[in-house]
Each structure stands twice: as structure tokens, then as C-alpha cells.
Amino acid sequence: MALPLLFFAVFFAYPVLAIVGRGLKDGGQWQLGRIATVLGDPDVLHVLWFTIWQAAASTGLTLLIALPGAYVFARFDFPGKHLLRAVVTIPFVLPTVVVGSAFLALVGRGGVLDDLWGLRLDTSVWAILLAHVFFNYAVVVRTVGGLWSQLDPRQEEAARVLGAGRFAAWRRVTLPALGPAVAAAALMVFLFTFTSFGVVQILGGPAFSTLEVEIYRQTADFLDLPTAAVLTLLQFAAVLALLALHAWTVRRREATLKLVDAAGTARRPRGTGQWTLLWGTLAVIAVLLLLPLAVLIERSFAGPDGYGLDFYQALRSAASADSTFAVAPLEAVGNSLAYGAVATVIALTVGGLAAAALTLRWPRTASDDGSRTAGRLVRGFDALLMLPLGVSAVTVGFGFLITLDKPPLDLRSSWWLVPLAQALVGVPFVVRTMLPVLRAVDDRLREAAAVLGASPWRVWREVDLPLVRRALLIAAGFAFAVSLGEFGATVFIARPDAPTLPVAVARLLGRAGELNYGQAMALSTILMVVCAGALLVLERMRTDQSGEF
Amino acid sequence: MTTTSRIAATALAAALGMAMLTACGGSSGDGGGTDAKTVTLVSHDSFNVSQSVLEEFTRQTGYKVRELKGGDAGKAVNQAILSKANPQGDVFFGIDNILLSRGLKEDIFSPYKAKGLENVPQELQLDAAHKRVTPVDYGDVCVNYDRAYFTRHKIAPPKTFEDLIKPEYKNLLVTENSATSSPGLAFQLGTIAAYGEGKWQDYWKKLKANGVEVVDGWEQAYTERFSGTAAGKGKGDKPLVVSYASSPPSEVLDKKPRPEQAPTGVAAGTCFRQVEFAGLLKGAKNEKGGKALLDFLLSKKFQEDVPLKMFVNPARTDAKVPPLFTKYGEKIDKPWTVAPQDITDHREQWIKQWSSLVLK
């Protein structure tokens, strides 16, 4: 518990508090009157309302569309499943700049839908919501599907034998077991869309603004730190309220589950209903997730003189007379992988330790009071770990700038700052993916092992690890994907001689000319391939042994 | 074995990381450390220079240049202000006339007169009295038009702000949000310079009535909405866009063979001048190196490298501009300007007024 706490104190709490403090202090005096001034502004309230509204709508829509997908991935076996599972995660790592242009190509003026049916969705709320579903589909499929595939189907069968209808059995047996994972997924999607920045800016047009966009403008454009600080606190409050709500709904539900090996629970679909569900899900994935990606890929090959590899060849040339880079853009692939590998290790270490600390049964003291305080402490720690998802990247970036500027922590231009910042965003995913599974491990197994003389470390290794191995790999995939796609904080701290893929894409998009645009599309395609490859490798690492349980 | 896969995964990741670290030679390790032989240049993302030119600087002076970039111009300036107690580098490049007063007020620069300043025209030297900043380049934000569209429809392209509110240009212009985009703000400042504090809002009311469209950023306006750029594959439907005077040359940059004229043109009466400066950061660890770098930024070698690397004009009058610029670009003789102090004093208020007038 100490290591994660330290990590968060140094790389999150301290920088963020410093920047907020700078906005609210004037000559050493706290100016709390500023809070009232800002909150009294009707514009601010309007922005807050829109932020909450669109996040709630996006979350609902994502769950609606992605839960059947989670079921299909968990319970059905079909050819190409692993590949597809990696593919649906790709959107999650694409920089919003790229997704924005892909969606504009689809739903914007002169886009695919416009050509076919004259349908234009850009600068509408629908475009924002659809893009959010596109981004977060994988979050639901991975967190919920991960647990679903390990639930023992025989429990539901037993309920059926006892006379429950198919739906009743699902509602009484499976749904309660899935509750925590669904809540965790919903929480993550909500936090993500709550702090949405690029999507809202590009697809919504200037008419829509979220808190995140406002904070960015006040900080980066106007240097109005007081207003930015108040808005950051407002965001904090909203996120904390949300976390409290989440903790309250989940706490009543987390029960010990009987987990089985995932390999044994999936089978080929049977009967028309199941086949329809499978094909329906595949159709949704094709339209919503693959189509925008396909548009990007198509554009990356559509060279100045017909289809070809022109743009890809341009990526290899380094500092020619007219290139945007000191190094060949292709080198960004290596940078991204290196940052990603390190960030994943950091996130797994910190997140894994945190998740383990959160599942420990705290020793009960003589009075019940003690355990309740401990319980509260644990929940507080749990919430703390989620906060980075709900804090604007620009706040963290500027916070780094004013706090990590003195030895021994002068990290401002250090290579390590990038993976550290990325790990900060990755940790919540690791915790959220591992926690439902870890908590579901039957404590009696641990006790039995301890009785038989195993040390705590060995108990963890022999009992917990085999059961959570799968979750751990899913978490690793998430952390790696987050790191590959992270843009907000990275753009602040990445060194120009070592741009990551998203930073390089944004730079190319920021320049006029067909060649730059084409290279941006080509680089986005490479980013997709790299991400899919990494996720596939992780999928493959799961040894398919059953019978350990 | 269950643990082997996990160990294998970690080992693989670590090995990958290690391999990358060594492969990227020098990208790891002591990012923070600098020595007397390194000079650090802090800039925004668009700063760009040929490798050969940088090597020339190292050959002449013995200093190696380390670059730090911090997002767009506004963000980079604000970072420099926030970290002024402990600056990130020795020289800052990329503060423009829109942000200049804020930087000067926050006192982040030390005065220094760079070599070659006598070759920079007076109108670019906005801090001539104190020399805290040195002009390095300038560019203009202007309305670009799609030549093919206007030839096809037999309409003369617009030349001035006044033209843009005429009925024949109804629904043709796309511009950027002043609040989120620097060319958008520059365009608004141009109208403020042309119509004055009293009248600019009336002008925008007319522009809005004439169907101006506002999008958030330059990329979107130029690539997605403008009909004249090759990058948009002819998908855009707006033949007028707020962009730069140097955008036409960049349209022909990748074309082989080079056409007779650029596919796009510039409405010369709608241009707002942006000047970019560099300055020695106060508290620089390597002041001597910083001064040498400032001299170099104003040297002919660097100045002649500027146009094709950053698509702006060199500040020095005696620097040669490449033919691509002279042939396809437009030289703006009478750009609109607003005094830096005025911009700093009113910027936020102007943006707010603009937003409630145009976006609501």
C-alpha cells in the first residue's frame, strides 16, 4: 500500500494541489471568495450541466451497445475471436485528433453518409455520443467480458433445473455476479466521457463545451489560474460524488464468486437466437468500430496519384528540406513502444499492489470501530486511485511543471516523466480490472493455504495469481493501450527528439498540404497495427491450460 | 506453469523497453542534466530547423542545442511564465505579438541585442527600446480562396474585409473559433484593426448574417471544410477559409511537376501580421550559450532556412527567400496590426464579446 500511495502523492496529488493552490492563493492568503464568483457565473453552470448530461448519455449508450458484445466475447467461440478482441480495443488508443477526422469523414459534410443519404451529424450531440461509444466499447467488453467468461455457467444451469426461466436464471444468478464489473465499467466510461476533450472540440464544434475544455482554455490560453483552479475543484467534486455513488452501489454487491477457467465456458453458438446475437454484435462492431478505422486506412493509401504507398515512404525520410521532424516520423513507433513498455510495468506494479492492498481483509480490532475506520480508509484509497481519470491533463501537466523542477526531482525534461504520467492514467484501469476478480477469490482458499503453512507471499502466488492471471494480462493490455494513445499529458512533456505516435500525428495534422495529411493517416494506421499487435501478443500469452481450478 | 507466462510477459516487456532504450541511443538517462556545452531552446511545437543548420551552429560555437517543445504557442509561453523562477532552458523562441505583452509584463526575458538586428525592419522590432526580445520571423493570417471555384462561377475572389459581407460571397467563408485557435483570433484582431473598437462588432454581425461558418481549429477549417486544398480530396465545400499567406506555397510543395500558379490565392486586404520573437530567459543557466544562440537565430544561415521549415518569412531583409515562396506566395505590403499592449489589455474581453456575438 505504501508504494502506490507514495507514487500518487508525488506524481499526482502534489503537482495538482500546487497548481490549484497557486490559483487560489494571493500573497499567501487563500482567496476562497473566488470560488463563489466563478460558480455564480451562469455560463459555468451551463458547461457543468452539459458535461454531466453528455457523459451520462454516452455511458448509457455505451453500455446498451457494448454489453451484448461482452456476452458474445465471453460465452461464444468463433473463428478470429482473439483478433477481433484486439481490434475492438484499437479505437481506445487512437488519439482523439485522428478519431475526430475519421468521424468527420463518416458523418461530416461530404462524408460517407452524406454521399449516401445526405445525413450529416457533425456539430451535433449525436456525433459526440457515437464517438464516445466508439472509444469506450472496449472498456465494457474487456472489464465485463473478462469476468463473465470466468463465471461458472453451471450455476445458471442449476437455477434452470430448479425451475427458473431462462431470463429469471440470468437475472438472479448472472446479473448479480456481474454487477460490480458492470458498475466498474460504467464508472470508467463515465469518467472518460466526463473529461472528454478532443471529441467534443472536433465533433461538437464551438457550440459545445465541457469542463475539460474550459479548464484547458483558462489554463493554457488565458493563464487565468484562479478560474481554472475553481473549475478543477468543481471537476474534483463531481468525480468524488460519482466515486461515492459507485462505492455505495458496489459495496452491497461484491460477493465471493466461484470462478472457473475461461477456456471452458465459451462454446459455439447454438440455435437461431444465439446466432442472431452473434451476427448482430458483429454487425454493430463492423459499422460502429471498423468503418471509421477503414476510412482512415483508405485515406492513408490514397496517394496523390492513385492508391499506393507514397505516404508510408514519406514517413521514412527524416529531416529533408520540407519535413516537420528532426527525426523520421517512423521513429515515433520505437518511442511509443519503449514508453508503453515502461509505463505498463509501472502501472502493473503500482496498480497490482494497490489492488492487492484493497482486497486484504483488515485485521479486526477489539471494537468494531477499528474495522470500520479501516474500511473507510480502504474505500478512500480506492477512490484516490481513480482520481487521475477525472482530472484534466493540462492541470497535471502544468502541475508537473511547477513542482518537479528542483533536484532531486527535476524531471521536467527527463525521459522518465512520460511513462510516469502515462502510468498514472493506466493505474486506474489495472485496479478496476483486477479488483472484481481479486475480491471474488474465495477467502477460504487463502485460509486453507495459510493453515497448510504457506507464507503470505506464497499464498498470493499459489492461490491469487493463477486466478487473476487473466485479469492481470487484460490489465496489462489496457495499461499498454492507454500509454500508446495518451496524448494530453504527453504532448506537454514529450521531448521533441522523441515524439510518441499520437504527438507525431497531431504535428502532421497541424500542417497544410496533402503530404502531411496523408502521412498523419499513414501514421495513425501504423499506430493501429502496433496496438493490435501488442494486444494480440498479450492475448496469446494466456496459456490455455485448464484443470488448475 | 501459471507463473511462467506472467514472468515471460514481464521479461518481454522489460526486454522490449531495454532494447528500445538502447536503440533510441541517448533518449534515456539524464534528461535533466545540462553542461556548459549545451544550450537549451524552449519553443512551441511548430519550431523547426534543418539538422544541417543546427550542426553549423555547433561547429561555429561548440554548443549543442537541446530542444524542448511545449504545445502550441500560447501554452509554451504560459509554461515559461509559470516556471520563471526556475526556467526550463536558456532561450525561448515563439512568443508572438499577440502574447508579447504578457511575457514582458511577467518579466521572463533578459535584454540582449542580437547581432544582425540592424538588418531587421523597424516595424518588426516591437520592443526596440529594451531589446528584451528579438524578432526572428513573421507571417500573415489571411483569407485564402479556392481559385477553381471562383473561375468556375465567374466571380472575382474577395480582396478585403468589406468584400466578405457582400451578397456574392454569402455562405462561402469558414473561419476558426477565436477562443481556441490562433489564426481565428488573428483574423478577429485584423477586423478590430480595420474597423476600430467601436465598429468591429457591427462588422461581425453582418458577417454572421452573410453566413460565416465557425469551426474550432485550423486543421478542421482548412483540411475538412475548405474546397481548395488537395488534402481534403475535394470534400470541402467552402471556397474561402482563414489561413496563412504561406498556405498557397505549401499546396504546391508536394506537386510534381510544379503548376503555373498555386491552386489557392490570398485576399491581400484581410491580412493580420504575426511576428515571432526569441528572447534570453531570465535566470538562464547558460547565458553565454543563450546569447550565441540568439545571434544564430538572426544569422543569415538560420534565417534562410526558416521559410521552408516553418512556412513563415525571415525577419532579416537580406535573407534570401526560396522561389517557391516568391512564385506561389503573396507578399503582403499593408497588413493590419494591433499594438501588443492593446491586445494584452483587451484580449479576453474581445474574445468573450466575439463568442457571445458569433457563437450564440
Image (tube, grey):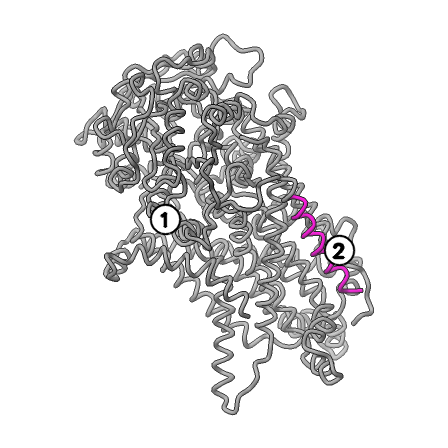
Mark 2 chain: A
Check the picture and name the quadrant holding the C terminus of chain A.
Answer: bottom right
Would residue A94 be found to the left or right of residue A530 on screen? left
Residue drawn where x is 64% and y is 41% of the image: A528
Mark 2 belongs to which amino acid?
Met
Q: Secondary structure at mark 2?
A: loop
Residue at the spot x=59%, y=57% of the render? Answer: A346
Q: Looking at this view, is A4 or A386 the one in front? A: A4
Q: Is residue A98 visible?
A: yes
In this orientation, which residue lies closer to the viewer: A141 or B318? Answer: B318
Q: Main structural element of the magenta stretch: helix, strand or loop?
A: helix
| Nearer to us in this view, B68 or B153 | B68
Q: Residue A476 placed where, x, y %?
A: 65, 56
Relative to A359, say whether A298 is above or below.
above
Quadrant of residue A170 within the rendered picture:
bottom right
Q: Is residue B162 magenta?
A: no
Mark earlier in primary sequence (2, 1): 1
Which residue is outermost to the bottom? A366
Identify the residue shown where x is 60% and y is 58%: A140
- Residue B98 percent location from the top left of the image: 30, 33
Label 1 marks a residue whose chain is A
Find disc 1 in the rendering and name its residue: A214
Lateral position of residue A411 relative to residue A485, left or right: left
Report the magenta residues as a range.
B1-20
Q: Residue furthest left?
A: B198
Q: Does the image show residue B159?
A: no
Q: Amino acid at mark 1?
A: Glu
Q: Which mark is residue A530?
A: none
Where is residue A188 shown, x and y percent of the image? 53, 59
Label 2 – label 1 distance at C-alpha = 43 Å
